[in-house]
Every structure is written in structure tokens, then in C-alpha cells.
């Protein structure tokens, strides 16, 4: 079942209910963030990085710890090219199903994997996007207690179910606005198309006057 039609309806409700999450940037700014979940992937992420390099775009990657451990050189490549690195958990497990101890271990294990791959200190990797966007108020309290920053989205084209590249592109372009935070996927689900999608939407968005920033910049705004 595809949930794409529900996201525009849920977004304003969730955004107002959980204001301590980062849902979008400054609505008065043309700055937008392009973010990618579930990687790094040995085939899909390198192709995506080439597209980002071509357009000199800085993006943000929310990595799975297990994928970083399997592909440390790709994680290092993304970081060395100036992209922002965040956490998506060690495995793609829904956070509400984990105990606080399991959740903390998942995040710290992912930080360690990123440190080993990128030489990036764990305290510098504190932006979290929960898998499937699932969290509870209690989880948000734990994030605050542990000094993590929850990052969500404003544009979700549901690329992971692979509805077709033209449809994903159309969904992004239809919903884009000032400060948008776009989520795509460079992992096993959706990553097959991600480089081609990026190749199409980036010049379109640049032509409309948008410019790309990292998640850290959106927090500062």
C-alpha cells in the first residue's frame, strides 16, 4: 500500500505537534535540503555522488550503521566530498519497537561505524532520522537527553516503493517550496533510481532559483 497521498495531510499536523523536530527550513529562504536514507550502498551511492559532484551540490546522508560497516570507503567518500552525515539506526528497525537501551546502542554503534569510516567524532554525528519516520514523544525525550537532533521531512515522494522515476520527479516538483526538506533513498529500496532522479530534479530546482544546503544549515536557520 502506498501512503503518498496521506503525507501532505499528515505533515502540518505532525509539524505542529512535534516542533522540536526539524521538519523544514526557513519559509522565507530559497534554501532547501536534499537528504538520502538507508545507505551507503555499494552500487547506488557512488552513482549518486557523481551526480551531486557534477552539480556541486551538498546533500545530507542518514546512514545505517550496518551499511557503513559494509561500505566504509563509500561513507568516507561522501563525507570527504562535503556531505553531511546523520544517523538512521544500525539496522532499519522501527525505533518504537526498541527498548531505550537497544535504541541507545543502535545509535552509538552507528556513530562508531561512522567514526571508523570517516574519522568523524561521534559527538559531531547527532542528527537522527527515525526509520519510516516513526517515533514517540518518549523517544524524542530520549533524543534530547542524549543530545541528538531529530530530523524529519516536508517532501516525501515515496521513492522506496519505486512508483516510477517520472512520478517521483513529479511529486517532488509539485510539493517543493521555500525551506523544503526532501527525503530520497540510496539504499536497497529505491536506490536503483536515485541517481537518475537526482539528475532530473537538481537542474529543475536550480532553474527555479532554489539552492541546496545541508541539514546543519537548516538547523542554524
Image (cartoon, rainbow, N blue to C red):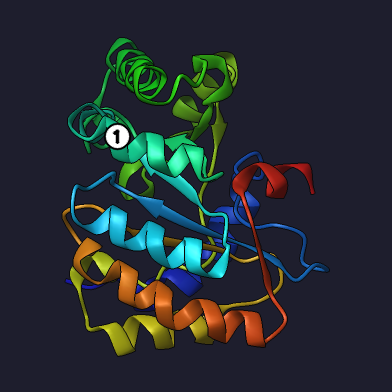
Image-quadrant location for residue 207: bottom right
Q: Secondary structure at mark 1?
A: helix
Name the residue at 29% across, 34% down. Answer: 73
Image-quadrant location for residue 106: top left
Q: Is residue 128 above or below residue 18?
A: above
Q: In the shown orientation, is residue 22 left or right of residue 65?
A: right
Disc 1 target residue: 73
Name the residue at 37% across, 79% down. Answer: 5
Q: Is residue 53 above or below residue 86?
A: below
Mark 1 residue crowding within 10 angstroms, few (<14) / some (14–19) / many (20+): some
Residue 118, percent from left and from top: 42, 26
Q: Is residue 135 above or below residue 207?
A: above
Q: In the shown orientation, is residue 111 left or right of residue 57?
A: left
Q: Which residue is nearer to you in this view: 165 or 198?
A: 198
Q: In the shown orientation, is residue 88 left or right of residue 68?
A: right
Q: In the shown orientation, is residue 73 left or right of residue 212?
A: left
Image-quadrant location for residue 30: bottom right
Name the residue at 56% across, 44% down. Answer: 82
Residue 95, percent from left and from top: 31, 32
Q: Visible in this render: residue 99?
A: yes
Residue 161, percent from left and from top: 19, 69
Q: Visible in this render: residue 186?
A: no
Residue 53, percent from left and from top: 49, 61
Q: How many marks?
A: 1
Q: Which residue is nearer to you in this view: 120 or 157?
A: 120
Name the residue at 32% across, 87% down. Answer: 167
Amino acid at each position: 500500500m502506498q501512503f503518498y497521498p496521506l503525507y501532505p495531510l499528515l505533515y502540518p499536523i505532525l509539524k505542529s505537534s512535534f516542533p522540536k523536530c526539524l521538519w523544514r527550513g526557513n519559509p522565507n529562504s530559497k534554501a532547501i535540503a536534499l537528504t538520502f536514507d538507508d545507505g551507503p550502498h555499494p552500487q547506488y551511492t557512488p552513482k549518486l555522488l557523481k551526480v551531486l559532484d557534477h552539480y556541486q551540490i551538498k546533500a545530507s546522508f542518514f546512514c545505517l550503521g550496518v551499511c557503513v560497516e559494509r561500505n566504509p570507503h563509500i561513507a568516507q567518500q561522501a563525507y570527504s566530498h562535503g556531505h553531511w552525515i546523520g544517523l538512521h539506526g544500525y539496522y532499519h528497525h522501527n525505533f518504537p519497537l526498541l527498548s531505550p537501551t537497544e535504541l541507545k546502542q543502535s545509535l552509538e554503534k552507528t556513530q562508531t561505524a561512522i567514526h571508523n569510516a570517516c574519522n568523524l567524532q561521534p559527538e559531531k554525528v547527532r542528527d537522527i532520522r527515525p526509520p519510516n519516520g516513526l517515533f514517540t514523544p518518549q523517544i524524542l525525550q530520549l533524543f534530547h537527553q542524549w543530545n541528538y537532533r531529530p530530523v524529519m521531512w516536508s517532501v516525501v515522494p515515496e521513492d522506496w516503493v519505486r512508483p516510477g522515476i517520472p512520478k517521483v520527479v513529479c511529486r517532488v516538483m509539485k510539493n517543493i517550496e521555500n525551506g523544503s526538506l526532501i527525503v530520497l533513498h540510496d539504499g536497497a529500496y529505491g536506490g536503483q533510481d536515485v541517481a537518475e532522479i537526482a539528475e532530473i530534479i537538481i537542474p529543475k530546482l536550480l532553474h527555479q532559483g532554489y539552492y541546496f544546503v545541508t541539514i546543519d544549515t537548516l538547523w542554524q536557520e
